[in-house]
Amino acid sequence: MTSEEISKVATALALLRTGFTVIGAKANTKRSRTQWKLWENNQTEHHIIEYWDKYPDDEPAILTDGKVVVLDCDTEESLVWLLDTLNQHHIESRYIVATKHGKHFYFRAPEGFEVKQRGYSSDKNPGCVDIKAGRSLVMAEGSTGKRLEHSSIRSVDDLSPLTPEFYDDLLAHNAEESGSLASPPVGNRSKERAESADQSSQKVDIASRLAEITSLLSRFPADEYHVWISTGMAIHFETEGSDSGRELWNDWSAGSDKYKSVKEIEYQWSKFNPSRAGGYTIGTIYHHAGVVGEQFQRVPKGEILATLASPLEVYSLRGKGDLLLNSVSDEKPLLFGLVQQGQATIFYAPPNSGKTLITLKGLIEDVLAGRLNPNWIYYCNFDDNQKGVATKVSITEEYDIHMLAAGQNDFSAGQLIKLLPSLTTHQHVADHIIVIDTLARVVDIMNKGDANKLTGLLRAFVANGGTVIALAHTNKNRSKDNKPVYAGVSDFINDLDCAYTVDAVGDHPHDDCHVVTFSNQKNRGGVVDAKSFKFLKGEGLQYLDLLESVEIVLDAEVEAIAEHFQVENDAEHISLAKRLISEGINTRVALYKAIAKESSLSQRAAILVIDRYSGNDPGEHQWTESKGERGKKIYTLIDSEPMEAGDH
């Protein structure tokens, strides 16, 4: 396999281990090559490896499978609305995938009510948020145009659940944006279902019929048109045109090479006669299962395993469970809680932000506290000139920490890569701490192939107990939310265990220190969400002085410093917002759109400005917030007379 093909398998395996229902899809088609049931009944690492060995160009996807809901924003307008509304409902998306045109936000399906799939045209309805739920196929990170942007989950169960209140707001928003009628609130739908015992009885009958039909469909394919359409009509009749029936027809159809899209299924389903379906019943399905099924025989799963077990048996860990458990090192937090021993962590930071300084300080603190043995710490310095190397060696050798530098003792980035396999099998691999400073000096961070080869070596090292800390740079250009953006391909943040971005907070108001914050972007547990530090800045300071000046800054102090600089930075936008409110542009959506139009801010950034200065404290806030007709939020300048909602 090529490095790109290995990356697809690695992504699929990671998704499986997280608890997603993984499925392979034809490249650039968003379609499964086989029936979904074949995947659902064989969610194993063996099956995934076997599949991509046979179809190396296929891409990883997941089935929402009733347990996952994916909200899809393809436009800036829909993204702004979703982020704002999630914030108002205090819901956090702990798993986000960046797509070619927007983002996928993953959530756990709520208990007690059904979330239904909804799709909209981004050209005709740019404000609508697509809903992928029930039994939907979603292309995952690692597929064309998709990369993992943020993850703070170890399993699917860690996804944030959606609430009925948020879901009602989402349906109402999509209905308003698309000009269609909104569905009744979730609470009302639940009440309607509970009021009718007859309906419950019907559902039991339909459920049993669905199970019967599902069993029959596994016996024949949807390749011939007359078989496909007559089967759909029969399913429609037997399930009384239910959504479950439509989804079952779609699942079965997706296993055929002639499958086009779920939209075709929905269109045909809507055209079927609900009273008789053209005379096609479950007898039709039995007929197809008997006649066509003889020509459609699957190889039993046991036979497949039997043919593949022998070449893999040499790699099996069966019988070594106790040995592996005894060799696992105790996981413990390092570097002020930013790093977990036995994991691979990456710090993305702009130049001169203190990433090297704080990393060295953390290692020294861990050595002094007895958490680390300095004999196994290897700081690989690829980013310093001769004076910088000499200065850092003079400091680290006082604590018996090893420093390796490019060009010294014939050491190089290539030598490190060459030695990683032997380090992985070293008897003290679990004691090793390897620091790579910086990543861009070791590998071309824009080359997926090179990146994948390195992360593969690092993953093997970590899988055997080693610890990696990699330092890397952020892009010069920040995100639309004014957040740091990591430089290079996404393979590093996808394949490593933990990632932080480092951002400047500002200068400390009471001393000559600079304050920065490490913010977590991905973790697999055992680390802090954020940690802030301060260190001296200025001309003529010795590196040892800088190192000794590093201190942790408490969250409350960071907030005060950030607020101080925030007000200064926001002064122009505050003035603009006050003018717009005074002119009658005082409802939430109208206001943030007007601010974005008349300034350099994005709509999302404009929302942050509005919320930051909304409240009743004249010493802190600039305007108050109240509710008007239909729940619209209205803003009034403090010390001004309240106004009606503007017409904007």
Image (cartoon, rainbow, N blue to C red):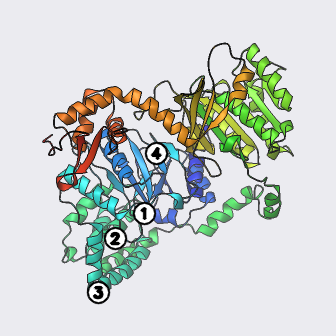
Element class at badge 1: loop
Q: Residue at x 73, y 31 (%)?
A: 360
Q: Earlier in the sequence, mark 2 or mark 3?
A: 3
Q: CA distance from mark 4 to mark 1?
A: 18 Å
Residue 242 in view (yes/no): no
Considering the image in quadrants, where does the N terminus appear?
top right
Q: Where on the picture, by quarter, is residue 168?
A: bottom left
Q: CA distance from mark 4 to mark 3?
A: 42 Å
How far from the left and from the top, in percent, is residue 580?
21, 33
Circle 2 packing at 10 Å, graded few (<14), some (14-19), many (20+), is some
Query: Against 317, is 104 above or below?
Result: above
Tags 4 and 1 touching, CB below 8 Å: no
The residue that label 4 is drawn on is 97
How far from the left and from the top, in percent, is residue 144?
46, 41
Q: Earlier in the sequence, mark 4 or mark 3?
A: 4
How far from the left and from the top, in percent, is residue 44?
60, 61
Q: Residue at x 61, y 53 (%)?
A: 49
Residue type at mark 4 is Val
The residue that label 3 is drawn on is 197
Q: Who is closer to the viewer here, 641 or 352?
A: 641
Circle 1 packing at 10 Å, graded few (<14), some (14-19), many (20+), is many
Q: Residue at x 72, y 20 (%)?
A: 543
Residue type at mark 2 is Ser
Residue type at mark 3 is Ala
Q: Earlier in the sequence, mark 4 or mark 1?
A: 4
Q: Residue at x 42, y 69 (%)?
A: 111
Circle 4 packing at 10 Å, graded few (<14), some (14-19), many (20+), is many
The residue that label 1 is drawn on is 109
- For residue 244, the mark is 2
* Left or right of residue 293: residue 131: left
Q: CA distance from mark 1 to mark 3?
A: 26 Å
Element class at badge 2: helix
